Image (cartoon, helix red, strand yellow):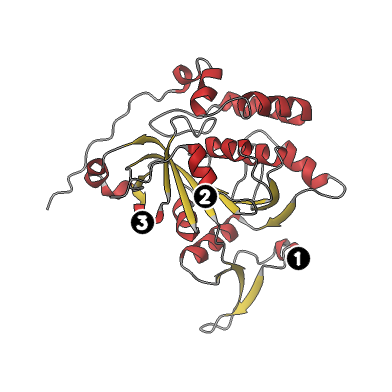
Amino acid sequence: MKNKVLSMKDAIAAHVKDGDTVVIEGFTHLICFAAGHEIIRQGKKNLTLARLTPDLIYDQMIQAGVAKKLIFSWAGNPGVGSLHAFRRAVEAKPPTLELEEYSHFGMVARLCAGAANLPFWPLKNYEGTDIPKVNPKIKSVDCPYTGETLATVPALRPDVTIVHAQRADMGGNTQVWGLMGVQKEAAFASKRVIVVVEELVDEAVIRQDPNRTLIPGLQVDAVVVEPWGAHPSYAQGYYDRDNEFYVAWDRTARDVNSFNKYLDEFVYGVKDRAEYMKKNAGLAEKLKAKPQICAGVNYGY
């Protein structure tokens, strides 16, 4: 089995290029802030960022100037309010960020089409909405079986997808448990895939629990071992969501100076996630998950 393990710095340098379409997936859970920070540190430019629910990490990437466009279905600080760098960019005269908006399922459908190597995906959920009026990429087709008119969305095939997960082996066989979004679909739709994990395990561990393998190694280009790489989101079984961070972020991000001060200290001011954690003294002790072990499963014949 080929060893695909790289440092975060080397993985981003090798697989994220200026002008790429980049997906950093995760639905509340397993959002790879560490990868977004490394993209900022390396000064990538003119990226198209795509995700169902862009939150704080995309806000930070917008503020840092790496993004030219956002493809999305909802944007915000979950449970708190707006993304302030996002709002400033969109409300500027002229706007400094292009937008391409879909419904949640519209984004899911785009990634499903990309993963299936289809040109588009049909769906019904744009009936009665105004989104097609502002997004000319949403078109329609007559069903050859029923004759009804269906909405369609084009396939989304990112240049690179970055997925955070609990564990993988050195070949990229990646296991996830807990709340999931469209990590699998995004990975299969993408030209290149970086998997960032809390823990690197032996192939035997993966084989002993095969049903947790969400992304097979054949789809993965690089494996990065980066404990705490999803903070302030969470990794079930490793650490909890940092709700205090999300609430405090609203105040930090409202002011450009305090936003930039945060980036200077916690992104540009560290070389990797280990240094980031040192700057957040006591964080690991506060958020580390307590054991709650699931009973084993008999896979025998």
Where is residue 34 drawn, in percent x and y? 53, 35
Where is residue 291 drawn, in percent x and y? 33, 25
Q: Is residue 29 visible in this depiction of the protein?
A: no
The amino acid at mark 1 is: Lys
Q: Which residue does the image show at 68% across and 56% down from the upper left?
A: 101
The amino acid at mark 3 is: Leu
Q: Which residue does the image show at 61% across and 39% down from the upper left?
A: 42
> Depth-wise, is mark 3 or mark 1 nearer the camera?
3
Left or right of 89 on screen, residue 274: left
> Depth-wise, is mark 1 or mark 2 nearer the camera?
2
Q: Which residue does the image show at 29% across and 31% down from the upper left?
A: 293
Q: What's the mark number on residue 216?
A: none
Where is residue 261 drawn, in percent x and y? 71, 24
Q: Which residue is mark 3?
A: 218
Hey, which quadrant is residue 267 in on the image? top right
Nearer-N-terminus badge (3/1): 1
Q: Which residue is mark 2?
A: 15
On screen, 176 above or below 270?
A: below
On screen, 48 above or below 258?
A: below
Nearer-N-terminus badge (3/2): 2
Depth check: give the residue in front, 210 or 22: 22
Q: Which residue does the image show at 53% across and 53% down from the upper left?
A: 160
- Disc tally is 3
Q: Which residue is mark 1?
A: 133
On screen, 128 above or below 64?
A: below
Spatial CA span between label 1 and label 2: 35 Å
- Dot 3: element: helix
Spatial CA span between label 3 and label 1: 40 Å
Q: Residue furthest left?
A: 301
Hey, which quadrant is residue 5 in on the image? top left
Where is residue 183 drawn, in percent x and y? 47, 50
